[in-house]
Image (cartoon, helix red, strand yellow):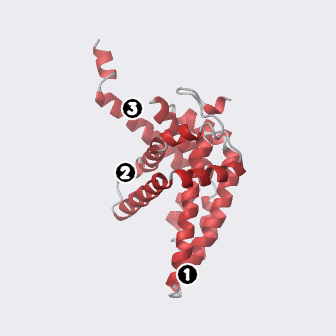
Amino acid sequence: MTNKNIINSQFYKILRYGYFFLASNLLFILANLLFLIVFITFPPRLEFSIIYLIALIPLGPALTALFFSMGQLVRTGDLAPVKDFFRAYRSNFWLSLKYWLLQLTVSAILLIDAIYFYQRDWQILAAVFLVLFLLVCLFSLIGFPLIATFEIELKSIYQATVVVIWQYALKQLVNLLTIVALAIIFWAFPSELFLFLFSLIAFYVMRHNQNMFEALAEQFSQPAPEGDDPLDD
């Protein structure tokens, strides 16, 4: 009876979720170890942009795996962090990589142009490229959760993203602004939150988008029923 009370207690649930967030976050960091090494070794300057772009290549599949893990946690309240992360990483690897290489290339061009024009005091042009860069980031923020939730093709990711932006623009803008705010706060006040940061952000996005995913299910491929793994199909 005592064991059942402990398992059903709020404290135990908090500990479980803390473990899920920590384990998934560490796996995500491990999958992006190359970028972490580059970030520590080279200052973020334009002359090192090629090195940063190469280091960012593994980020795409890792994002899909993290979003899938947090989506599983949102739907079922349970998670096998290592198993779910690496199964999603392996099963979605090539699609995530192709999608990410497109997004990364366009993002890099727009951001470099924004910095270039800003340094030459062409603020209007810089602002235009910055807005376009943020729009591409918004596409990525929608695209990776779609890959993690649905069986979908590369072309359909962009089609679905346009639909999402058209129908749920405010929801996705809130997601983007929340992530930007958290990134600024963490950059200004770094702390142990880093050990949970990425998984918490992914959990927030998947939870905030859950109703949207259900609404999109009839337009695109069916998501897994509650408690099931969509990767088993």
CA distance for labels 2 and 3: 17 Å
Report x, y in % for residue 59: 59, 54
Report x, y in % for residue 132: 57, 69
According to the picture, the residue beneath numbered tag 2 turns out to be 193
Q: Residue at x 45, y 41 (%)?
A: 207
**Between residues 132 and 218, which one lies in front from this camera angle?**
218
Q: Earlier in the sequence, mark 1 or mark 2?
A: 1
Drawn side of residue 200 relative to residue 110, left or right: left
- Callout 3 touching callout 1 (CB < 8 Å): no
Report x, y in % for residue 152: 68, 43
Q: Quadrant of the N terminus?
A: top left
According to the picture, the residue beneath numbered tag 1 turns out to be 125
Label 1 sits on a secondary structure element that is: helix
Q: Which numbered disc covers residue 16?
A: 3
- Toward the top, the furthest residue is 1
**Between residues 4 and 72, which one lies in front from this camera angle?**
72
Label 2 sits on a secondary structure element that is: helix
Amino acid type of the residue tagged 2 in the rendering: Leu
